[in-house]
Image (cartoon, helix red, strand yellow):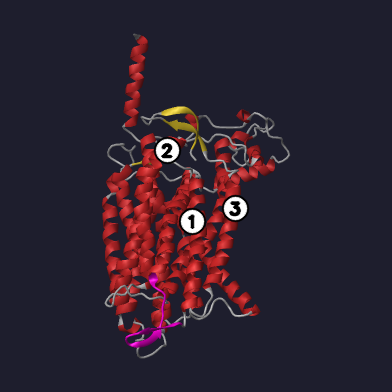
Amino acid sequence: MVREMKRNGHKSEEKEEQKWVLDDCVDYKGRIPLRAATGVWKASLFVLAVSMSERITYFGLGSNLIMYLTRVIHQDLKTATNNVNYWRGATTLLPLIGGYVGDAYIGRFRMILFSSLLFIKGLIMLTMSQFVPSLKPLNNDISDQTNKVHEVVFYLGLYSLALGTGGFRPCSVSFGADQFDDEHLEERKEKMSFFNWLTFAFSFALLLGTTVIVYVQDFVSWGVACLALAIVMALTIIAFYMGIPFYRYKMKPKENPFLPILQVLIAAVRKRNLSCPSNHALLFEVPESENSQRRLRSHTSRFRFLDKAAIVEEKYTEEKENPWRLATVTRVEETKLILNVVPIWLTSALVGVSVAYGSTLFVKQSAAMNLKISNSFEIPPASMLSLAGFSTMVFVPIYDRIIVPIIRKVTGNERGISMLRRIGIGLTLLIIVMTVAALVETKRLRMVGQEVVTEDGTKQEAMSLMWMIPQFIIIGIGNAFYLTGLQEYFYEEVPDSMRSIGMALYLSGIGVGFFFSSFLLTIVDYVTGKIGKSWIAKDVNSSRLDKLYWLMVGLNTLNLFFFVFIAMRYTYKTVLKKATDDGSDADGVETLP
């Protein structure tokens, strides 16, 4: 009878605990969040909306930017491609700063609001550069010169957008994922779906940006397009602000998130002459009851040198009070996490190169083809990118609602397939994309200069744009694998206090790829020009982009081999707490591949 009463009392306590979210977050009044009233989809939908608005702007401007630079500002192909990639690189490297500031100082929510204002400022400057008479570009029908003032204001607007993206992008993704409790099994599964639907939202933004926005840019004006984007962004920011009562806010760390890593490294160096104990239970760890962090890390065998930081030396009685001499196993393992993601980050750089060429050279390639579907309708070249967004939108729901549940039953993995396998499939699809692109470009170049006889006489034959469809569809399916996989990986596999920085690492890997794509173009242009005719000429018809694409096939293949080598030896993050079906905690070690 007594046992039964204790058991019922324990169950009632568990049910009471499940009413509240007991991780390191609070509601908008600084209280422990009520699970039913905060977080999950009721909160993350606001984040998805404002994130989608920001992506519509990014894709709408970025996808057609190379056409604007070549047609309005009269830059040659190589200069325009490099400038687009520099801007894209800035939008993906600046998040390293924004993510750090958001995690360490002002919080993710405040960083999103502040960055949104910078973003709107950039859109206003772009709008002014199209409507204010002294800032407008010169009429192409009158002169092929450029208005330098217009060029300066235009670039200032673009890089204000890059600054806004630098804070907005890493913090919005991590803030959206923060709305799901890792210690609650159902919410944790929903968070896995969140990354899939985030990719869906971004793909819908890509579809709108490369169809509606690009069409307005090409057939109405860039000014109207920028004005519309500014209005949409302002409305979604207001909606995001209205979601304040529903959000869960992660508490800011009490210290710089990089400081514990530095302390672990110094402590390990100080004890470099000591031998690690064979029993890792002898390493120092603060008991859970004294630990302010909810999730303790279990010991792993990688980077054993760092374990020396957790060795307790008897001769230093004050050691436990000095984090520069003694670190906990949890802090050692979090340092290992950062070192563990570096090889994966390196592989993501070449993904950025392929993404860069897909949004620049593929668009210029499309512009040199027959864009007419009928006598009265012509497809804007940049709108071909919408096919990638459309194929991702079709594939993501199928993957999330059909494929994952089936694979989950077969493998027993909550994600269906592990994050690294998902990324590996995406890298394989990148090789296929570049192979198809090389074959299509080879065929297109053979048709350049050929004439066909029509009712109106002879004219130059142009390859149909329909030949470009397969590579854009494969890009879209690949996005659902490698981009979603990389986002989820860099959110999950970094310390909990550095998740915005983790998203910034994901973006910076792609950003380094954008810069490397420009560097690769310059090197290829220089080397091929020295030994013969350069592969990169003033226009696509005079260039040999097919050979550049075959070079990318080789580089992506080597990248895939390196990735597989790393993945086969990879150890996922482990924790000492495990969520059960009802969300309650159980003792043990948990690995989330």
Looking at this rendering, what residue extends furthest in the bottom direction? Answer: 142
The magenta segment is 450-465
The residue located at (46%, 66%) in the rendering is 358
Q: Is residue 572 above or below residue 222?
A: above
Which image quadrant for residue 267?
top right
Separation of residues labelled 2 and 3 (CA atoms)? 26 Å
Separation of residues labelled 1 and 3 (CA atoms)? 14 Å
User: What is the three-letter code of the residue carrying label 1?
Assistant: Leu
Residue 384 in sight in this render = yes
The answer to whether mark 2 and mark 3 are in CB contact below 8 A is no
Label 1 environment density (alpha carbons within 10 Å; few <14, some 14–19, many ≥20): many
The x and y percentages for residue 462 are 41, 78
| Residue at mark 1 | 429
User: What is the three-letter code of the residue carrying label 2?
Assistant: Arg
| Residue at mark 3 | 561
The residue located at (45%, 82%) in the rendering is 450
Which image quadrant for residue 25?
top left
User: What is the three-letter code of the residue carrying label 3?
Assistant: Phe
Q: Specify the quadrant that holds the N terminus.
A: top left
The x and y percentages for residue 283 are 62, 32
Give the mark nearest the N terminus, 2 or 1. 2
| Residue at mark 2 | 408
Front position in the image: 58 or 135? 58
Front position in the image: 248 or 55? 55
The answer to whether mark 2 and mark 1 are in CB contact below 8 A is no
